[in-house]
Image: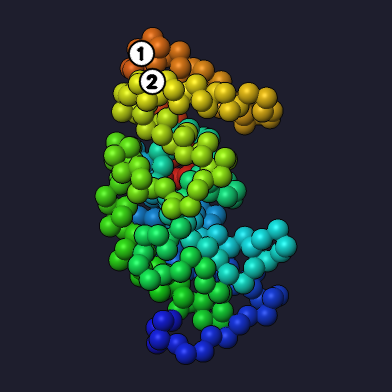
Amino acid sequence: MKWEDLKVYRPLPKEELRQAFKPFTAAVAAHLAPYGFILLGRKLIRAVNDVMQIIHIDTRGSWMGISATYETGVAVIPYCSDFFRLTSSSELLWQKPIEEIVPGIKNHYRITAEYVLLAEYLAGRIIRDVLPYFNSINTSAQILSHWEDLLPKRRLFPGEAFAYDIVLLYCSLKNNKPDAAIPLLSALRQHLEGKSGNRAEKLGNELDEYRQLVEQDDWKAIHEKLLAAEQLELRKCKLKL
């Protein structure tokens, strides 16, 4: 029996919902493991060339508490900075709803007693429709050339716009594009003015270092710095290329 052929779905009691999320996500991961994906929290990730391809199965619920539904987001980003926080359980700011990639699928589905069949259905649609999408965007250069395909159709919130500019910046640095990098460095640094906290300070220092190297036209040093950051992120994620 397939999930999409069922006529009746049995809702789970609230106390069983949280227990069902983990095996549901693990079941999706098991179907995608042959394609090189590993499960990292709620994210299924794989490293391809100089980008990370991500499927985010968001089962966190809302601020009101646990939810009976989950959301699925899809992203392709560089991984040459710990700003992307791949090992964090925080929200993924640069993702496109799966319904904008996969025809006929919804971004919200209810977790019911049939979640094993639902996991098989979701994984099958990812294999059929999302993997070809990933195959068309598997380098930082392709992120730049397919930029519109990566953006959600709705208007971005300020924090999301900032995160997408970070993606653009690192792709520009990786592809030796100073004319694109300089204005992005200026805008991002301005955005950080007045922001406090270790993460903002660390990112600000990183942006300043890259700006100095771009202005010096020292692309050898830039690529060495990017490569070192990539290797560190791969180790954190326990991934190999």
The residue wearing badge 2 is 222
> In the rendered view, how is the structure colored?
rainbow
Looking at the image, residue 179 lies above or below residue 104:
above
Q: Mark 1 and mark 2 in contact? Answer it, CB < 8 Å.
A: yes
Of residue 35 and residue 210, the one placed in the foreground of this image is 210
Percent across and percent down for residue 63 are 70, 58
Q: Residue at x 53, y 48 (%)?
A: 92
Q: Would you call the spot at circle 1 few (<14 residues within 10 Å), some (14-19), or many (20 or more)?
A: few
Rendered image quadrant of residue 105: bottom left
Query: Is 35 placed left or right of 38 in the picture?
Result: left
Query: Is 90 placed left or right of 126 in the picture?
Result: right
Mark 2 is on which residue type?
A: Ile
The residue wearing badge 1 is 218
Quarter of the image with the C terminus in it: top left
What's the mark number on residue 46? none
Q: Which residue is farthest front?
A: 155
Percent across and percent down for residue 143 are 33, 41
Residue 33 can be seen in this image? no
Mark 1 is on which residue type?
A: Asp
